[in-house]
């Protein structure tokens, strides 16, 4: 894997002269600003971001408007973020009836159905169990369906592809709790139900529950945020977002899928031949360049870093290839975080923009050998009416004036 | 390394019967709460935590009170947190003259002194450089000096040991910028100076600057928080906290240390023989059990997880041993995150509390073979007046009634 660590790369790799980006310094640059001459503000018990960063917010997608302001999604502003961890305040959200205001002292998780002993767990009891800490992405299966509009939408990267995020989760392995309840052999599925007023529900294969599913209590070090399922959510790493049931109130062990409203009216994939696929749980290999990306403008020729996010529901990202000529030639990017399965990896490739047109693309290959598909190949599989599991390659076009736009290629 | 992943461990390892923590469930448990019958709240552009979590705040240590409310420290509430990442809003702070309110469009970083070409960098220019993403702890060299009081202070773990935190940082390798400025061979040190009104300054060895030092712009995915150096800070991983100069305004390359006020009036270690050590940069191997910890009370006999944080300024944590009998016998804990150098690792060990007295301790060994010292051994090295680099083993005493207190052992 290429490294951005090597010394002298500004000159050697990019051929730029020193001071290509910086300006010369003089004593005037050290005169000091007004904030260096006044005593600063005191400590806050719970900190806030800078007032200069307030414009960085989620993109709200509320199809029912004020009638149902919490039904829909909120997208992470990917193009303003860096690294791998999504700050909890900017984590993407997909909710079906708003965010409930749950008292953790009263909330209970019930495990029942095909078990030796139905059990109820308070949050206090759950907090005593052995835990694990893992970094995982959650992506809505409808993420990037804005990339299926007849003409490419001119929106920031996050407003198109930001219905996904990646954070550090801490919780209990679900199999511990199933073991404690005494799961019966005929239990091949489980129903997971949320405590929102929609009672959002999905059927989860027992095999997944016994593999790497978590009962998550903490996110990025603190208790889950309400919009992420406070005080407890299901985590089924790599599976489509809505299956990670928030505000989890019960798990019922059953023999067959329950065909809940949420998995029949939605979340099925219309194929080109008119059939629909159901229970397409795993999110495919995918990537998106966040910098440079649509709606940005490159201020001048010279050095840039092409940087973005890559992930796969099947496991680890093996490599990310980047093209600046619309897929004719590819270079392998450097990766950070690729040792973690079902998590974002950050990819980076230094790039010298000569001032001409360039079509930027990225392509993920995961550890199972799955490759992110080209747009035409992806489209050929599905009906034009399908709006789920779009993981095709994204193209950002850089114009000669440095403006970046969203194109289909 | 032991794993908490194995199946059946509740029964096999701990010998507990099923339903040891959970209660039996009946239809009554599924009746539903009031929040399941009302539509929830809508999406927020920038999310907040639950109103039920508001009591989780930093512990403020403001020795000059309202005269200088931003001089001192704010400690992370370790005992309420989980995992590895510290949420930015609860990251520990050590500041010398409050938090400046810096306009990122006006702030500049200057590199000057023994260079071929003095340079000035705007935040916009810095944002174009190739970046790296790494997870690192920052610990104040005065952390845990509250553990040196004549009698053990009865405070929560975070109020004693929380002057440290660990987050994901994204920024530019300092050596790239030094290369661009043309560092001269006689430059063996650099002065790093902040844009706070104290102009907090430290001398940094050039060797460290060329090794793994970063010019950090992002923390946990978003731009640095003001209290963590917005818009740009120095990161010298593993070195004492104050050297990670916040609000970085200049780096001057010099031949010898500058002996700034911040490294002569403070941050020297008084030895038992009356001498003082200066420039003891690296933070030693250390750990603290966060759960159970002082001021907590175990509600009943039975299963608990002993969980905490371990780290070393020298590199990776190799292992953490845990004792429940004050250091007579030790068991090796499971680790998460130990693949990352100069970062927190989370350690975990399942424990069955039988109702008697227990003295809980943890001990880190790092990849260089450095071992966290016992309290008596640590104290023997230093003058009673020393208040820096306390990395000795911490003891939490569990009483027969389940109450946990801070003791010296």
Image (cartoon, coloured by chain):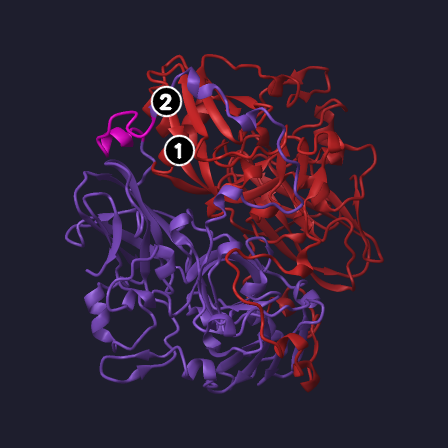
Chain colours: A purple, B red
- Magenta stretch mostly in which secondary structure? loop
Q: Quadrant of the N terminus of chain A?
A: top left
Drawn side of residue B10 relative to residue A22, left or right: right
Q: Earlier along the polypeptide chain: callout 2 or callout 1?
A: 2
The image quadrant where one finds the C terminus of chain A is bottom left
> Residue B102, image x and y in percent?
52, 34
Q: Which residue is mark 2?
A: B119
In terms of depth relative to the viewer, which is nearer, B88 or A319? B88
Secondary element at image label 1: strand
The label number, if any, that marks residue B173 in the structure image: 1
Image quadrant assignment for residue B155: top right
Mark 2, secondary structure of its residue: strand
Q: Circle 2 marks a residue in which chain?
A: B
Q: Is residue A18 magenta?
A: yes
Q: Chain of mark 1?
A: B
Q: Is residue B265 magenta?
A: no
Magenta stretch?
A7-22
């Amino acid at each position: 894997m290429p490294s951005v660590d090597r010394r002298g790369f500004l000159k050697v790799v990019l051929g730029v002269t020193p001071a290509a980006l910086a300006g010369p310094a003089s004593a005037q640059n050290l005169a000091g600003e007004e904030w260096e001459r006044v005593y600063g503000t005191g400590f806050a018990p719970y900190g806030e971001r800078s007032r200069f960063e307030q414009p960085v917010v989620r993109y709200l997608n509320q199809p029912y408007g004020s009638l149902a302001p919490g039904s829909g999604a909120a997208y992470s502003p990917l193009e303003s973020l860096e690294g791998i961890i999504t700050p909890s305040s900017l984590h993407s959200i997909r909710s079906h009836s708003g965010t409930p205001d749950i008292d953790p002292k009263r909330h209970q998780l019930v495990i029942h159905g095909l078990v030796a002993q139905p059990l109820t767990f308070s949050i206090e009891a759950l907090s005593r169990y052995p835990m694990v800490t893992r970094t995982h992405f959650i992506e809505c299966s409808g993420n990037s369906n804005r990339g299926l509009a007849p003409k490419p939408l001119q929106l920031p990267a996050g407003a198109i592809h930001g219905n996904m995020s990646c954070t550090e989760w801490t919780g209990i392995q679900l199999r511990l709790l199933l073991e404690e309840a005494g799961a019966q052999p005929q239990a091949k599925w489980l129903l997971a139900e949320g405590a929102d007023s929609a009672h959002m529900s999905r059927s989860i294969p027992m095999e997944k529950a016994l593999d790497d599913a978590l009962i998550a209590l903490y996110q990025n070090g603190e208790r889950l945020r309400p919009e992420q399922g406070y005080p407890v959510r299901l985590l089924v790493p790599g599976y489509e977002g809505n299956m990670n049931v928030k505000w989890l109130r019960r798990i019922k062990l059953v023999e067959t899928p329950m065909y809940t409203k949420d998995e029949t009216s939605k979340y099925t994939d219309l194929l080109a031949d008119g059939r629909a696929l159901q229970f397409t749980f795993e999110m495919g290999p995918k990537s998106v360049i966040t910098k440079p990306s649509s709606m940005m403008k490159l201020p001048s020729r010279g050095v840039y870093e092409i940087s973005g996010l890559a992930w796969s529901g099947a496991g680890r990202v093996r490599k990310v290839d980047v093209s600046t000529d619309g897929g004719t030639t590819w270079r392998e990017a450097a990766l950070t975080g690729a040792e973690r399965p079902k998590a974002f990896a950050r990819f980076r490739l230094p790039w010298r923009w000569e001032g001409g047109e360039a079509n930027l693309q990225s392509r993920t290959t995961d550890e199972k050998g799955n490759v992110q598909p080209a747009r035409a190949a992806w489209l050929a599989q599905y009906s034009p009416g399908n709006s789920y599991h779009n993981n095709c390659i994204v193209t950002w076009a850089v114009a000669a004036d440095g403006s970046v736009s969203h194109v289909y290629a």
